[in-house]
Image: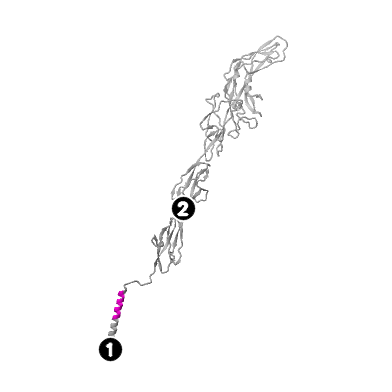
Amino acid sequence: MKTHSGKRLTSALAALGAAAICLMAGVPAAQAAASMTVHAQAYYYFSVPGNVTSSGNINNSNIEGGGNNYDSTKAHTVTAPTATQVQNVSMWSRWPSSSGKWGENHDKFSGNADYEFVGWHIPSNFNRGETYSSNNGWSWTKLTIKTPTAAAGKNIAPGSSFAGPVYNPITCTNSGGNVNSVDCRALVSKFIGAIYIPLIRFDGNGATSGSVGTDGPHMQNNDLEADWLYTMRKSPYARTGYTFTGWNTKANGSGTWYQPGDVVNMGKAATLDDMKDAKRTSLALYAQWTADPITIRYDGNGATSGTTASQTTGRNVPIAISQNGFTWNSHEFQGWNTKADGTGTSYKPGDKHAFSSNTTLYAQWKTLNATIRYDGNGATSGTVADQTDQIGKTVQVRQNGFTRDSYIFKQWNTKPDGTGTAYAPTADVTIPADGMTLYAIWTPVSTTMPSTGGSGLMLSLGGGIAGLLVCLASLMLRRKRRS
């Protein structure tokens, strides 16, 4: 391998595409000029990038073509090196171990290279003639093309062969009159550059799983001259709670968008020097994500009627908590909670909160109570305890615990004069929202005999006494007669 350090490949291809070198003897003696026919020897060098300097220049190494030292005046076939013979099949736009860089830093993206070797480029000046300079009495006629190569300006695949250009013989003349095949010879060197295509690299951009290597474009119809195309891939990444929405050249989605299936033109294959000049590097893409919608569901948690509609929002996107739409008899709404028993996180209607997953909020209730009070309504002693319980609940009316002199308890009534609703002890009663008072209703005890008609009684008594007196008089009269 011959190395041409410090020479850019592009300049080498332009200036050395058909350079000739003449080897000659020392200064000839003053003799009559002599000449001879010379067949220039052709050498083919395949240049590949070796390293990069601190200033960013590429040093190329040269692989000699197989079967070098061709007779340029005869038809000859040149075979290009294969990909396995090229050390740097994958290359970087930013060399890992050098400060010489161009392009953006793609080190964090998938894969480990920005370019991939795909073939060789034969310069378009491959068929030009050459003029050799005269020196110390030696001179050569111009090197001209006899049969040009059809490969000039073309790209060829690794390991493929092409017919080199055939040159006409030239004449070597020595003004000193002494020529020979050792001193009177010519060389022509041909430099062929390695060509690469940019690769496609990926960043998961927050992905929680998945991985991928480096993708490359495909050649169209086996034509190394055509633009290389890449069909955008689906995402190999996944992100919990998010849906993949495409690829973008910027992490925040402000760059160029690409969707799976899109065909991207990656341009033509070129040497790395040309890539550098054009600032062409790998296509680095960031996965783009949209938070999956989540649902906030509301549960009445015992409510007897009403509804509260569910809400749909983005993950971790603040949303106002809904007002309560449920009702529950004898209960008062207190707020929402992530647990039915109220031991979770509490939220108030109207507050803004962000949720990371589907969530159910349970209505929290306070039981409303009322009291049935018992009034003795004139009682002289005793008590009856109040009854406090849930509004709307059915309870039994208490037994009477009051007493009232000269009265007997009759029943309970919602009005003290007994004109309201009457309740007997142990009867069922529903506790109203405002509570209620039950009044004892009393019946007096009587101390006077009941009237049965006084005059009749007096007459009977009078008649009885008169009869008694008559009997006594009759008895006394009978005793006198006996005596």
Left or right of 34, for residue 219: left
Q: Which residues are magenta?
A: 455-466
Residue designated by label 1: 480
In the figure, 153 relative to 211: above or below?
A: above
Determine the residue located farthest toward the left in the rendered image.
Answer: 481
Q: Which mark is residue 226?
A: none
Residue 361 x/y as whole percent: 49, 47
State the CA–CA distance, disc 2 to disc 1: 103 Å
Q: Position of residue 387 (x, y in %)?
A: 45, 60
Q: Amino acid at mark 2?
A: His
Q: Answer with left or right where residue 450 lies relative to residue 348.
A: left
Nearer to us: label 2 or label 1: 1
In percent of width and height, residue 5 lies at 66, 25
Seen in the picture, residue 221 relative to 353 is either above or below; the reply is above
Vertical relation: 7 (above or below) 371: above
Which residue is at the front of the view, 388 or 237?
388
Q: 477 or 393: nearer the eye?
A: 477
Q: Residue furthest right?
A: 29
Mark 1 or mark 2, which is nearer the start of the sequence? 2
Residue 214 sits in which quadrant?
top right
